[in-house]
Image (tube, grey):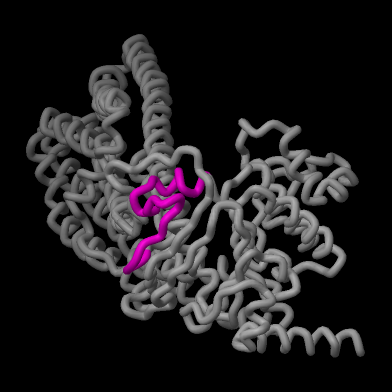
């Protein structure tokens, strides 16, 4: 993992008030549920200690004097309190879980929406596994905070307060005896918090590494298998997995020490109560009911303290997760729209590049002084060696990236003055690497745009020749497409991408190496489809196979980010320059193939 990715996991404070305020802002729309939960917490927290007090009364006033009728009545009262406590606990649990789910739904939706708005420059530098971790693991950590942390911590606090109230009401001296062990508990808790803080950060770091590695290697599984790298990659995964395991074991070690320590302190407090309270009973200054009540209250007292430690666990994880989530939400890697964008009307499709310079990284220009003009309805081909900058031209025309110098005009209007969504509405792209989504043939052609009727989708598929195989499928246009179109051939996926482009009736059509991955028969079908697609549209065709672009109105030859030659097929051959050499090279390759 790169250093910048590791640095992303190195976090600041264990508790950050600014982060917490920002997290609490997501609860504001549901504050009535928070208020209801807090009120229920106050009530339910009092019922436990009150039940213990009734037990003390039962022992001292009824059991001690063999009063069966009074014992029955107070037992029924305790039973009623238990039933009431269960009912209130049901509503409390429902409200807190509902609050957590609603809040997390809003936050997860915000993250996904924000991620969709980020420029491709962000995704170039950010592993997908890290983004997935934000939307899954980190969000789930915040779910624990909202549903079990923020509101439920009130339950623990109120329980401790009510217990202390009943303790002081029953016997002040015995209360101070019980509380005498608290300094030791506070010291152990302080040590636990300090140790577990770094432990959680370490766990999150290794989890992010694990997710990123899994995502990358599952996506590239075919490459791993074809180069017989399964064993090497398995060993690397085992190392990462081992580090994650060790981080979790280290974290569990602190808990395995802390919880028994709390139990020991609780038992010590109970022993002190029995020692001191027993002596008071012998001296007849304390009742047996008081002693039993204090033992029960002491056990009840340390339970929420243990829970508060678990809440600290949740808080630690939530602080770590929220810092990463807000770092993503605060990322401003946008291709920004102008404050008052120009609206495109009656688009004709004219394109002009004026002295354009572009770099993915500062001062490392991949396009230099690019100038050319495409008239509406013209077909322009762009050729050149790999790395010449052909695809970069498409990336800046569609405003996936913004240029550093120069201007790009569509129908005479600078694209930086347009709303990027409005601009892209008039452009369709067919890429070499077709991406299909899980769904159906229909949803992949329409991109789930319900405004496009089935008849139009069928017409688009028929025009590009995709209907030939679609109609043979069991469910035709409702045939299920699995992830990345794994059940379809490369040619079939390519034909669907052509149908997709046509279904949106673009004014500007871009074909980026669209036929380089298909067989000869499919290429012939696609070439016929392309001829129909280009009618009445401005088209930019990027191609390695020069035979597919000989009829283009204009051919632009690029080399090392610059335009070296411009002209039609015959003009460029006559110049005997770069295009001529490329053509001769491919022609010889074809002759060799025929000879073989």
- Residue under the point 39% across and 48% down: 114
Whether residue 482 sits left or right of residue 11 in the image: it is: right
Whether residue 438 sits left or right of residue 208 in the image: it is: right
Please say if 69 is above or below 556.
Answer: above
- Residue 421, quarter of the rendered image: top left
Residue 219 can be seen, yes or no: no
Please say if 277 is above or below 491.
Answer: above
Residue 422 colored in magenta in the image: yes
Residue 332 can be seen, yes or no: yes
Residue 182 in the image, given as x and y percentages of width and height = 15, 52
Residue 538 colored in magenta in the image: no
Q: Give the range drawn in magenta.
A: 403-425
Residue 26 in the image, given as x and y percentages of width and height = 30, 38
Whether residue 98 sits left or right of residue 379 in the image: it is: left
- Residue under the point 48% across and 57% down: 351
Residue 357 in the image, given as x and y percentages of width and height = 37, 72
Please say if 207 is above or below 269.
Answer: below
- Residue under the point 78% across and 67% down: 518
- Residue 38, quarter of the rendered image: top left
Q: Nearer the viewer, residue 278 or 37?
A: 37
Q: Which of 79 and 234 is in front in this view?
A: 234
Count of numbered labels shown in the rendering: 0
- Residue under the point 38% across and 28% down: 95
Residue 591 in the image, given as x and y percentages of width and height = 85, 87
Q: Nearer the viewer, residue 297 or 65?
A: 297
Image quadrant holding the N terminus, namely bottom left
- Residue 178, quarter of the rendered image: top left
Image quadrant holding the C terminus, namely bottom right
């Amino acid at each position: 993992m790169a250093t910048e990715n590791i640095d992303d996991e190195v976090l600041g404070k264990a508790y950050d008030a600014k982060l917490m305020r920002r997290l609490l802002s997501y609860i504001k729309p549901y504050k009535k549920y928070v208020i209801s939960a807090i009120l229920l917490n106050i009530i339910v927290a009092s019922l436990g200690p009150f039940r213990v007090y009734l037990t003390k009364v039962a022992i001292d006033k009824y059991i001690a004097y063999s009063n069966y009728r009074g014992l029955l009545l107070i037992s029924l009262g305790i039973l009623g309190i238990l039933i009431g406590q269960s009912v209130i606990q049901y509503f409390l649990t429902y409200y807190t879980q509902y609050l957590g789910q609603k809040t997390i739904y809003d936050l997860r939706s915000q993250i996904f929406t924000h991620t969709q708005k980020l420029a491709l420059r962000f995704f170039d530098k950010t592993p997908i596994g890290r983004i997935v971790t934000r939307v899954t693991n980190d969000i789930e950590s915040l779910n624990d905070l909202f549903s079990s942390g923020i509101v439920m911590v009130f339950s623990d606090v109120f329980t401790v307060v009510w217990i202390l109230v009943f303790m002081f009401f029953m016997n002040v001296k015995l209360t101070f005896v019980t509380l005498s062990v608290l300094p030791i508990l506070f010291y152990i808790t302080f040590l636990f918090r300090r140790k577990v803080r770094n432990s959680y950060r370490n766990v999150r770091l290794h989890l992010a590494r694990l997710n990123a590695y899994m995502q990358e290697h599952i996506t590239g599984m075919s490459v791993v298998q074809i180069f017989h790298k399964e064993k090497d990659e398995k060993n690397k995964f085992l190392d990462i997995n081992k580090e994650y395991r060790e981080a979790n074991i280290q974290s569990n070690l602190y808990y395995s020490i802390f919880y028994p320590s709390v139990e020991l302190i609780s038992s010590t407090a109970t022993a002190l109560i029995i020692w001191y309270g027993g002596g008071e009973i012998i001296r007849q200054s304390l009742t047996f009911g008081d002693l039993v009540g204090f033992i029960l209250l002491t056990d009840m007292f340390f339970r929420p303290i243990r829970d508060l430690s678990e809440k600290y666990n949740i808080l630690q994880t939530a602080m770590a997760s929220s810092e990463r989530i807000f770092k993503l939400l605060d990322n401003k890697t946008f291709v920004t729209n102008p404050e008052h964008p120009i609206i495109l009307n009656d688009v004709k499709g004219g394109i002009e590049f004026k002295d354009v310079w572009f770099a993915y990284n500062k001062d490392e220009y991949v396009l230099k002084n690019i100038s050319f003009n495409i008239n509406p309805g013209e077909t322009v081909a762009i050729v050149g060696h790999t790395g010449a900058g052909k695809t970069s031209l498409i990336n800046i025309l569609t405003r996936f990236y913004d240029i550093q110098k120069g201007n790009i005009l569509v129908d005479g209007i600078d694209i930086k003055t347009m709303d990027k969504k409005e601009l892209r509405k008039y452009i369709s792209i067919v890429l070499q690497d077709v991406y299909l989504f899980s769904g159906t043939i229909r949803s992949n052609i329409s991109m789930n745009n319900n405004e496009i009727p089935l008849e139009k989708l069928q017409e688009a598929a028929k025009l590009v020749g995709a209907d030939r195989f679609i109609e043979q499928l069991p469910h035709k246009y409702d045939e299920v497409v699995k992830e990345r179109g794994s059940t379809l051939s490369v040619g079939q996926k390519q034909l669907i991408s052509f149908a997709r482009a046509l279904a949106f009736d673009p004014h500007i059509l871009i074909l980026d190496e669209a036929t380089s991955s298909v067989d000869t028969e499919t290429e012939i079908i696609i070439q016929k489809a392309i001829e129909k697609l280009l009618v009445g549209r401005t088209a930019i065709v990027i191609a390695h196979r020069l035979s597919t672009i000989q009829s283009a109105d204009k051919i632009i030859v690029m080399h090392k980010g610059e335009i070296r030659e411009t002209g039609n097929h015959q003009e460029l051959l006559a110049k005997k320059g770069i295009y001529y050499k490329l053509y001769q090279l491919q022609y010889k390759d074809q002759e060799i193939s025929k000879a073989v």
